[in-house]
Amino acid sequence: MDGVKQIRMKLLSVIVPCFNEEEAIPYFCEAFKDTRKTFQERWPEVSIELLFIDDGSKDKTLELIKNLSKEDKSIRYVSFSRNFGKEAGLLAGLEHARGDYLVCMDVDLQDPPSLLPDMFEAVYVDGYDSAATRRVTRQGEPPIRSFFARRFYRLMNKISTAEIVDGARDYRVMTRQMAEAILSMGEYSRFTKGIYGWIGFKTKWFEFENVERIAGETKWSFWNLFRYAIEGIVAFSTKPLEIIAGLGATVSFGSFIYLIVSLVFFCRGAWDLKPVLAALILLCTGVLLLALGIISFYLSKTYLETKRRPVFIVKEKSEE
C-alpha cells in the first residue's frame, strides 16, 4: 500500500553439526525453544531456521532430525554419505544456509543457546561483523588436555599471522558477507578457527565458563585433537619449515667445527675418531628424519589440495 513501508523479514540460520548425537538432540531442541522465544520477542522482524548437518551418523540422529523437520518447516537438514568431520559439517552449513545472518552452534549444549540474543545484537544492532565466544575456564576437562590446548593457542599466535584467541569456540554469529568470505577459501584441509582469524572482520567476543556436554560422548580424543592441531599449524604457518632450515644449518656448521676439532685431537692421539663419527652420523640422521617428517606434512597437504576432491558428499537433504 502507498505510504506504508514494507519491512523485509530477516533470516538467521542456526547451523548445528551432528555426529551420533541422538541423545543430545532432544535436550538441544528443548533448550533452544526458550532461546527462540526470547529471541523472537526482541527481534520479531527476524525469523530463524535450524539447519542440522548430519555428519554420517550411525545411530538414530538422522531419523530424529527428519521427524523434527516434518513437524517444523523451519527445520532443515543435510546428511552426508559418510563421516567427513566437523570442519566439513561447518562448511556444508555455510553453503546450504539461506540466512542473512548465520550462527554455528554445537548440539551438545557446550555452546550456551542463551547467549544467542546478545550475540546477535552485537552484529544486528552494534555493527560488528561477527560475535564470537571463548571459554575462560576449562573445568571438567582432563588437566593434560587443557595444558596442551593452551600451549597450542600460544604457539599458533607466535608462528601464524592468523589471530586465534585462547579458548575460542566455533560458536559464532556472522553476517552473510563474512560467511561468503569463508566460503571463498576453497582449501580441502580446513582449520576454521584459523580461517576466522585470517579473514579478519570486526569481531566482538563473549566469554563464558566451560559447560560440559549434556549427553552422549565427545568425539574428540586426545589423538584427534593433536592431529587437528597439526592441521592448524600446517594450514596457517610455514614457520616449521623455517625452523628446520635453521636447525639444519646450525647442525651442519656445528658438526663441521666438531669434526675439525676431533681430527686435531685424533692426530695427536688423544681421541678415537670412530665413536665421534658414529655420534655425528646419528645426530645428523635424526635431524634429517625430523626435517623430512615436517616437510612430509606440507607435501601431504599439497597432494590432497591438488586432487581437488570435494570436502563432503551430500547423500540427502530436506526439501528447499
Image (spheres, rainbow, N blue to C red):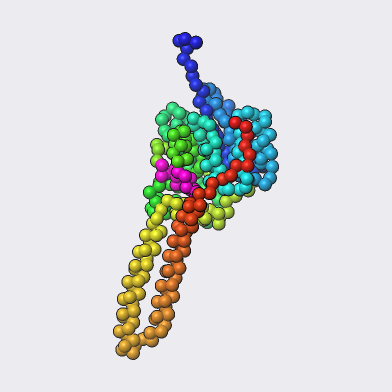
Q: Residue at x 67, y 29 (%)?
A: 71
Q: Residue at x 42, y 33 (%)?
A: 128
Is residue 109 in view from this perspective?
no
Please state the total of marks drawn on the protein image: 0
Q: Residue at x 42, y 73 (%)?
A: 283
* Quadrant where the image shows the C terminus: top right
| Magenta span includes 305 | no
61 or 296, which lies in front? 296
Q: Position of residue 115 (x, y in %)?
A: 52, 34
154 or 230, which lies in front? 230
Q: Position of residue 185 (x, y in %)?
A: 45, 43
Above-or-below relation of 22 to 234: above
Q: Residue at x 41, y 84 (%)?
A: 274
Q: Position of residue 28 (x, y in %)?
A: 62, 37
Does 303 sit left or right of 262 as displayed? right
Is residue 138 in view from this perspective?
yes
Q: Which residues are magenta?
A: 185-199
The furthest residue to the bottom: 269
The furthest residue to the front: 307
Q: Position of residue 26 (x, y in %)?
A: 66, 37
| Magenta span includes 198 | yes
